[in-house]
Each structure stands twice: as structure tokens, then as C-alpha cells.
Amino acid sequence: QVQLVESGGGLVQAGGSLRVSCAASGRTFSSYLMGWFRQAPGKEREFVAARRWSGGTTYYADFVKGRFTISIDNAKNTVYLQMNRLKPEDTAVYYCTAKLGTFRRGSSWDYWGQGTQVTVSS
């Protein structure tokens, strides 16, 4: 059973930084794409970032390019999203995701975590 467990969310002031984590378990993820989505109250869930577990190409939503970085620590089986220069509009529940196959915008993801709340105050 694949399990993705997010942690590290919290309250941060605008302009600050936060790193959320996703502990992945249940199988070997070397062939998987790993990603982050977020959902703000009253809004649709939106793509944030993704990369292959084994490294290589990264993908970012335009609104986070230059501010957020997705990374993976293989030894710890953990996916990270480093968020810098946070804005109030970044406030959302952040979800860790995983899928097999290639990255394609609009495609579905196989596994989801429960999410971690990130709140950015002005």
C-alpha cells in the first residue's frame, strides 16, 4: 500500500520561507513522478511542482517559478517543497502526489497524501 504523508506546514509571514515534507512508503518509487498540488479555500486544486524520483527534469507552475523548489532525498524516502518569498496567495493545503508515466499537464495522479496546511500572513 502506497502512503504519502505530508508534514511541515504552518504559519509564516509574507516574504518568509517554509519547507513542507512528504514521507513516501509502500514501494520503490524510482520509476515514479512525484509532485505537489495545492488547494486554497473555495478554489480548485492546482498543480505546483513535479519531478521524477530518479532526478532530471523538474516542472513548475508559472506562479511559483523562482520561488519554490521540489527535491527528493532518496535515502529518507522524502519529497520536499522548499517555498521562499511566500505570498498570502500561497495560503493553501499542500498535497503530495505520485504517479507512473510521463509528465503531462491535465493528467491524473495515482496517489495522494492528506495534505498539510500552509498559511501566509500579510
Image: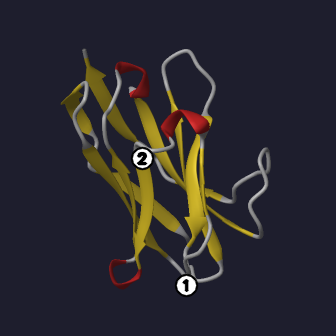
On the picture, is 49 further left or further right than 114? right
Residue 28, numbered circle: 1
* Residue 89 picture quarter: top left
Question: At x 55% / y 75%, what residue is drawn?
Answer: 53
Q: How far apart are the alpha carbons under marks 1 and 2?
A: 25 Å
Q: Is residue 59 above or below residue 74?
A: above
Q: Position of residue 3 (x, y in %)?
A: 49, 65
* Residue 42 picture quarter: top right
Look at label 2 and name its amino acid.
Answer: Phe
Q: Earlier in the sequence, mark 1 or mark 2?
A: 1
In the image, 113 versus 122, the foreground residue is 122
Q: Position of residue 68 (x, y in %)?
A: 42, 47
Quarter of the figure that contains the N terminus: bottom right
Question: At x 59% / y 74%, what residue is drawn?
Answer: 56
Q: Is residue 23 above or below residue 95?
A: below
On the picture, is 6 further left or further right than 112? left
Residue 116, numbered circle: none
Residue most extreme to the front: 66
Q: Position of residue 91 (x, y in %)?
A: 38, 26
Q: Is residue 98 above or below residue 40?
A: below
Q: Number of labelled discs?
A: 2
Mark 1 crowdedness (10 Å alpha carbons): few <14, some 14-19, many ≥20? few
Question: At x 46% / y 47%, what residue is drawn?
Answer: 114
Q: Is residue 76 above or below residue 118?
A: below
Residue 68, numbered circle: 2
Question: At x 65% / y 81%, what residue is drawn?
Answer: 31
In the image, 105 versus 2, the foreground residue is 105
**CB-based contact (under 8 Å), mark 1 and mark 2:** no
Mark 1 or 2, closer to the camera: 2
Mark 2 crowdedness (10 Å alpha carbons): few <14, some 14-19, many ≥20? many
Look at label 1 and name its amino acid.
Answer: Thr
